[in-house]
């Protein structure tokens, strides 16, 4: 089953797919034709976003966007596998992109998969985009609306005035205003939760009405809610958060899980979450 983080990524990228693809590929004349259903049933996994594009220079090709909260050591192997599967299924060239949202120490992130066995060599290159290395001005100057919810964690985006500007742009667009809670979530990584709530001008009652949580309510699936909690715990607290998730996963009450997710968004420390549990 695809995680809710996959669904959110697809939704965010689909808001401005042409600008997104031009940015991640550095091919300025690219036109998006379709966001594909990229589920590879035989491996029971859905890669984040697979986009069919066209360029006068390169012709038809696919852009494989693999988005990770934090880089994992098996990503080169996975990107290689998904690229091969997509190439075989669609019979088109693939431009793979690995996007890492949050840093995890001083890890050297490779830009290719390499294998050498019994004299046989295999290699798959892919582009790596680390959000913490992306200049925040790109989101504003190139009008890449898909980057706006991530402004607080982009390079130079961790100040109040920049976050307020991102919020203004999100709220000014009917398609984008649903993402202000995502912006708030990442803002808690760089600002105090009280200031984030002040900037957003919402309290917990308003948060309950946000489309992000309504989407969870609409799906009404405990598994989806647990996936969102797991992603949030990992994003905010790393391995400590994932250790805590084993306790969270034992909770059966849907309303309690929903309240827990809201609390994690504005929590300043893992201790606050432990107290709630």
Image: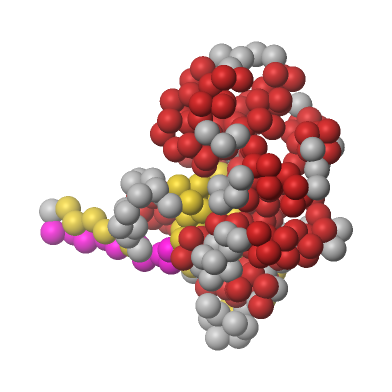
Predominant SS along the magenta part: strand
Quarter of the view holding residue 238: top left
Quarter of the view holding residue 52: bottom right
**Quadrant of the image containing the N terminus:** top right
Is 16 situated above or below 141? above
Q: How many marks?
A: 0
122 falls in the magenta region? yes
Image location (x, y in percent) of residue 139? 64, 69
Image location (x, y in percent) of residue 71? 41, 49
Structure colour scheme: secondary structure
Q: Nearer the viewer, residue 228 or 224?
A: 228
Q: Nearer the viewer, residue 41 or 82?
A: 82
Is 55 situated above or below 215? below
Q: Which residues are magenta?
A: 119-128
The residue at the far left in this view is: 118
Quarter of the view holding residue 172: bottom right
- Residue at position x 51%, y 26% in the image: 271
- Residue at position x 56%, y 47% in the image: 189
Q: Nearer the viewer, residue 90 or 63?
A: 63
- Residue at position x 57%, y 26% in the image: 273
20 falls in the magenta region? no
Image location (x, y in percent) of residue 264? 61, 33
Q: Is residue 50 visible?
A: no
**Quadrant of the image containing the C terminus:** top right
Is 249 situated above or below 132? above
Is residue 252 rendered to the left or right of residue 15? left
Is residue 204 rendered to the left or right of residue 56? right
Q: Is residue 114 visible?
A: yes
Is residue 244 rendered to the left or right of residue 112? right
Q: Nearer the viewer, residue 6 or 108?
A: 108
């Amino acid at each position: 089953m695809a995680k809710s983080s996959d669904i959110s990524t697809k939704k965010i990228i689909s808001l401005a797919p042409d600008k997104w693809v031009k940015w991640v590929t550095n091919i300025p004349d690219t036109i998006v034709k379709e966001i594909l259903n990229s589920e590879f049933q035989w491996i029971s996994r859905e890669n984040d976003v697979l986009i069919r594009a066209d360029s006068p220079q390169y012709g038809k090709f696919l852009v494989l966007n693999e988005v990770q909260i934090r880089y994992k050591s098996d990503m080169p192997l996975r990107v290689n596998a998904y690229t091969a599967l997509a190439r075989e299924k669609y019979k088109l060239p693939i431009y793979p992109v690995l996007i890492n949202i949050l840093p995890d120490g001083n890890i050297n992130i490779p830009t290719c998969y390499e294998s050498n066995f019994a004299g046989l060599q295999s290699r798959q290159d892919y582009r790596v985009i680390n959000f913490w290395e992306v200049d925040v001005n790109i989101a504003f100057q190139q009008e890449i609306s898909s980057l706006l919810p991530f402004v607080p964690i982009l390079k130079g985006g961790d100040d109040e005035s920049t976050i307020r500007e991102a919020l203004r742009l999100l709220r000014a667009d009917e398609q984008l205003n649903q993402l202000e809670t995502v912006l708030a979530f990442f803002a808690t990584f760089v600002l105090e939760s009280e200031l984030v709530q002040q900037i957003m001008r919402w309290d917990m009652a308003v948060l309950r009405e946000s489309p992000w949580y309504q989407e969870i309510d609409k799906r009404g699936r405990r598994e989806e809610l647990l996936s969102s909690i797991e992603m949030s715990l990992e994003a905010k607290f790393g391995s400590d958060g994932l250790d805590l998730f084993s306790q969270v996963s034992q909770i059966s009450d849907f309303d309690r899980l929903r309240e827990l997710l809201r609390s994690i968004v504005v929590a300043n420390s893992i201790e606050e979450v432990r107290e709630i549990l």
